[in-house]
Amino acid sequence: MSTATSQRSFLAVLTGNPNCGKTTLFNALTGLRARVGNYAGVTVERKEGALLVSSRDQPVTILDLPGTYSLSPQSLDEQIARDILFQRLPEVAAPDLVLVVIDGSNLQRNLYYATQVIELGYPTFVALNMVDVARANGHEIDDRSLSAALGVPVFPMSASTGEGVKAFADAVKAHAARGTQRVIPREFSELPEDFGREAREIQGELSKLFPHRERLAAAEALLLLSDDQALQAHPDHYPAALQEKVRNARTRLEKSGTDWRSASIEGRYARAAAIEMAVITETGGPEETVSDRIDRVVTHQVWGPLIFVGILLALFVSIFWVAEIPKGWIEWLVGALAGWVSGAMPPGDLNDLLTNGVVAGVGSVVVFLPQICLLFLFISALEDSGYMARAAFLMDRVMSRVGLHGKSFIPMLSSFACAIPGIMATRTIETVQDRLVTILVAPLMSCSARLPVYTVLIAACIGGGAFVKGLTLTGMYLLGIVGALGMAWLFKKTLLKGEPPPLLLELPPYKRPLPSVILRHMWDRSSLFLRRAGTVILGINILLWFLATFPRDEGIGNRFEVERNQRIQAEHPGDTTPEAWAARRAALEGAEGEPGVLLEALRQLDREQAGEELRNSYAGRLGRLVEPVFRPLGFDWKMGIGIVASFAAREVFVSTMSVVYNVGAGDAGDEEGTSGLAERMKTERRADGTAVYTPVTGLTLMVFYVFAMQCVSTVAVVRRETNSWRWPLFQFAYMTALAWVLAFATRWIGIALGGG
Amino acid sequence: MDPRPLSSLTPGSKGVVASIQVPPAHRARMLEMGLLVGTPLEVIRFAPLGDPVEIRIRGYNLSLRRHEADLVLVREA
Ligand SMILES: Nc1nc2c(ncn2[C@@H]2O[C@H](COP(=O)(O)OP(=O)(O)OP(=O)(O)O)[C@@H](O)[C@H]2O)c(=O)[nH]1
């Protein structure tokens, strides 16, 4: 091994309980150069990066494992951590060094896991984190005696302030340079005698069976003996003879009155408590910590729910108000860019493609970046501060009513940002059924991609001030929540019955989140959205532009040209040549003040021409093809185009409508700050002269978007997470059907109440 | 005093776990979170909707549902 290390990078894995500050330490160790990816076959996030202080000729890679409470995994996340530590994941090399992070303010339970990991026999360093919190609580931890008790180096630190991190990083680097050292095997669990004997027996078998993992054998034997699932989860991993031996050992223990399930856990906690006693000096902390005092309000019978609703409301209102300001700037930029492109090139198809297809289309999505950043900012702050766990605590009753866990609440809340991280967050849910139900309903939560759609439709269809608009938006989000809960209840009652496992939710102390970490989080997530705008949406826009532009029928243009010229001549009989008509039009367009009757009429003809051309285009034909499906909902073929296109991704609706309505250069940014598209939609008329985008139409469209599964990426992620096409297809079908039915109901209720 | 279900204690009361009657399959994680026979605990509060209950064990706060709290018997101190 010592010869191999010089060729490949030295691998140090970072592991620890959830909330111990692992991510913060990882960021401090690796700076901004971390790579985020996935483990093969599952969407568990794989984060690795080079140790900042490591040198070129002795590179050190840090791999951040998912947070885990023990080596007997209860969820996919924990399973990945266990598999890497047990060298069962072929894509990850055997760790050269294990870095266990311990939350110093929660020593006993963190020691439980740390001692399990130390027993694995790797060279191990302990990062004793959050010493600042421990100190504030009146606990002084003697890191030297902790190191003596654990038999491994211990580094006290506060990852969030950076205190002690440098010394830790240097020690890791020095260790990598020194190469392999012998590790003295350690055992921490004080086992009953017969249990210890049986464990050693199995350890002997394991060493013979898996000689390359010999040093892990002792720890593995303990787990095999005491963890029900360790054998079941890997039926083909362990030969039948060994399985038989383990079962016989358990029977013998039961006969002699030893509880094989709890013996090693109790023994380990006894040791962890003893170590804690020995290393902590009480310096007299406050009667009640700040976190406890906050919790008295935040989880209060009355204030708790009020604060919860208040936070959600603040989120949505700020999305509508605060984000408007940078949104205006981006709109202006997009408009300026489109204008510049269109001016810098000769007129023609390419010019039109660039301004109307590329710039306006992508621009109309990028414009929503401030809102999406704000949403992710909120969610990251709620997660890192510890509030998310309280939200789960408050909401658990509601969730249990529909047969789910408080834990399902977190994936669902994340789905407000995007269903993909939400579905990925279901990895922490223990049972298969609950996880599936959560996956099936998560996309009903209104994700950030729906926000552009709601925003445009609200601006175009819903009158009233910011309050009414904010209320409508909140209503759409609430509708998604109610829909998700209702469907979850239905699925748990019918398709995926099953007892929920016990909820064991840790409520970690509140932390002041680090701005740098939150911003990093926000950026990681927002840039994913941007990349989508840059690739999928750009591709769809170019395709759409072609569909909307071809086939060309010169006849339409000529017919309208003749009509326009006749109008001009009727008012100005002196204009008789094409040059004169063009000059007249230019003069009218250039004039100050309100457009006159003639100019209005000319512009109306322009719009009719665009509409006629679109109708004749491939996109128009496609729209009319699907129109019968959507006619009962009151949607015309133009909306049909938008809906069909947004089955790729919802936010495409906005850019599609921009292409459909020809909102290109010049129209994009206007003074009021509402987007040019919404203004254009307001002026859209039916053949009988009534407005197309009435409040009822707007609401019907929005309800459709609340429920429909219009996102290729989500389908792909569900496919990967459930390992079959069955669930994503079922999900697509039920959501689309639900969307249609509820949109239909909305329309008829709206009409019955007197809407148009 | 006879052990009482954890779910019947009032916020602020303290005690020691006397027995855990949760079925074995669901018990493992409880044990690993440090909720063992003999563990001292304090009831902090019930959530506004009455469920779950928040307790303090081994220096940290954990919440569990009444459904399980019914099956954790506590000898009050
Ligand atoms: N006071 C203090 N806060 C810290 C320290 N280390 C981390 N934190 C804060 O603790 C919170 C949780 O830290 P994370 O790094 O996200 O924890 P984690 O272990 O990665 O948590 P999971 O992502 O759930 O596994 C954040 O708000 C950090 O800013 C520390 O040493 N002292």
Image: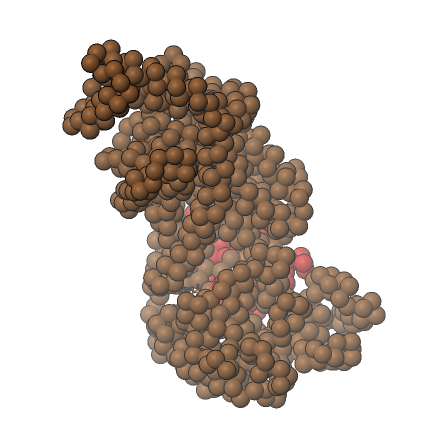
Q: Position of residue A123 (x, y in %)?
A: 57, 82
Q: Pick the quarter of the image with the C terminus of chain A.
A: top left
Q: Is residue A618 visible?
A: yes
The residue at 38%/30% (across/down) is A662
- Left of A325 or right of it: where is A383? right
Image coordinates of residue B5 in percent, x first then y, are 56, 56
Left or right side of A529 for A461:
left
* Quadrant in the picture for the N terminus of chain A: bottom right
| Residue A726 pos. (x, y %) | 67, 42
Apparent side of residue A202 relative to residue A705 in the rendered image (left or right): right
Residue A668 placed where, x, y %?
Answer: 31, 36
Q: Quadrant of residue A205?
A: bottom right
Horizontal arrangement in the rendering, residue A414 relative to residue A460 (left or right)? right
Q: Quadrant of residue A600?
A: top left
Is residue A408 shown above or below A474?
A: below
Residue at the location (53% across, 36% down)? Answer: A647
Q: Nearer the viewer, residue A308 or A34?
A: A34
Q: Which colour is chain A painted?
A: brown
Q: Output the letter for the chain in red.
A: B
Task: Tell me the residue at 58%/30% (across/down).
Answer: A737
Ligand 1 is found in which quarter of the picture?
bottom left
